[in-house]
Image: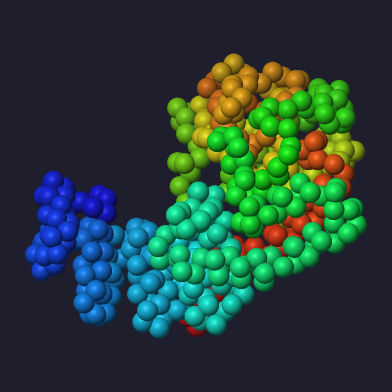
Amino acid sequence: MNAYSAPGSAAAVRSALARAHQHLADSNVLSAELELRAVVEQAPDCAEAWLLLSELAGGRGDTARARECIDAAARHAPGVAAVALQRAQLQLASGEPQDAVATLAELLARQPKQYVGWLLLGQAFEVAGRHELALRAWSQGLRHGQAAGQLMGMASTPPAFRPVIQQIIAQVNAELYGPAIAGFERMRAQFGASELTRLEHALAVYLGARQDGPKNPHQKPKFLYFPGLPEGPYHDPFLHPWTSRLVDSFDAIRAEALAVLEADAGIEEFLQFAPGQSRAGYLGGAGSKPSWDAFFFYRHGKRYEENHARCPVTSKLLDSIELCEVAGQAPEVCFSVLQPGTDILPHHGVTNTRLVLHLPLVVPPGCALNVRGGGEHVWREREPMMFDDTFEHEAWNRSDRQRIILLMDCWNPHLTEAERIATKHVVELISVAENFTPADLETAATALRG
């Protein structure tokens, strides 16, 4: 059952809703409300009808009835974003910011990219007197909205936020990102303005001061776009001088990976899912249990000491090369295990300042990577490859055996040393400013209620 129908009555509900909309178009509000009341009696899980009833009640100043309708929608059709958003707006209008925060926290735990929810959450925190939390929530809303092609100007901004969006952007940039901007200025003083013009451009795009992001429609970094780097999804892995060392140690690395899988210990899912978050948008395939697993040497910059100890050859090699180190983010290095019958669905990476290098260790027939704009790549054991994961990409294992790769992120080799150092510094400051985890959100909501 979905939020717009009831068993055996879907056609009748759709017809009644259509009549209600026509009545509204004709300014016949009473007839529209009678139709909508009939709908919710027949199909109480029809969120659209409850939302319209709530709006009509609010329009005539009946706040109590508006709240009653939206609360009914939340009970009968939980999980509908529009219901949570309207409910939070009514709670704010009624002077209940703590309840609005709780409503929005529940929504964002399920739908963390719901940018309107983040913007409303910022308003709720601001009303509650929690300005720093408001800035962090607004920054999340701006980031997710712009990633979705919204909030790039008045035309792509929802009408409700047009009067305040410029003020929100100015406050977030001045107050939340102030330390990152100051950090960039320190780096520019250290290396010279001419050395960091590309990073200055990247920061301006990130903060919304410039709109000239990637030209290729397939390239959509989830975090930071660094302009002026050679375009295209595939890159020569031997641009890193240490790649040849990995190839020379292929047999030993592969043996350690096979021993890890034989022991079946220390292996975890590559993807992390929040409670209530579905893996359906990330993994698919014809296998009985599609899965993408990993044995991590580093994850989000954290070193897994026990795993290093179990694979001394691989560990020694990793210690001998310049890893892409960004606190809380990188490096990410693992034995990547794609189980039989698993498809990794199309997605985008974080930033083109980092590339992804693969050393294929075990590749059965029927395994490949496809990067939009670059075509399909069939891995070959012992042959490294490197690509820009900010281009949409997918991978699959259509065999009956595991596919195993040494996967690692690495600096884009086309960055200068000054750019690597300054980018690391600025990105770490941005991460500190933006850090607002689901746990932080739940803690803040609980504190406001308490």
Q: Position of residue 266 (x, y in %)?
A: 69, 43
Single out the residue that lies furthest toward the top: 365
Q: Quadrant of residue 136?
A: bottom right
Q: On the rendered structure, is 374 left or right of 180?
A: left
Q: Position of residue 369 (x, y in %)?
A: 60, 26
Answer yes or no: is residue 239 visible.
yes
Which residue is found at the position 73% from the left and 28% from the top?
A: 235
Which residue is found at the position 72% from the left and 68% from the top?
A: 178
Residue toward you, 329 or 153 = 153
Q: Position of residue 110 (x, y in %)?
A: 45, 57
The mark tally for this picture is 0
Q: Quadrant of residue 219?
A: top right
Residue toward you, 200 or 385 = 200
Q: On the rendered structure, is 283 left or right of 238?
A: left
Q: On the rendered structure, is 165 left or right of 328?
A: left
Question: Does 122 sit above or below residue 98?
Answer: above
Which residue is found at the position 29% from the left and 71% from the top?
A: 71
Q: On the rendered structure, is 298 left or right of 4?
A: right
Answer yes or no: is residue 407 visible.
no
Q: Position of residue 250 (x, y in %)?
A: 81, 24
Q: Quadrant of residue 336?
A: top right
Residue toward you, 105 or 316 = 105
Type of colouring: rainbow
Which residue is found at the position 63% from the left and 52% from the top?
A: 210
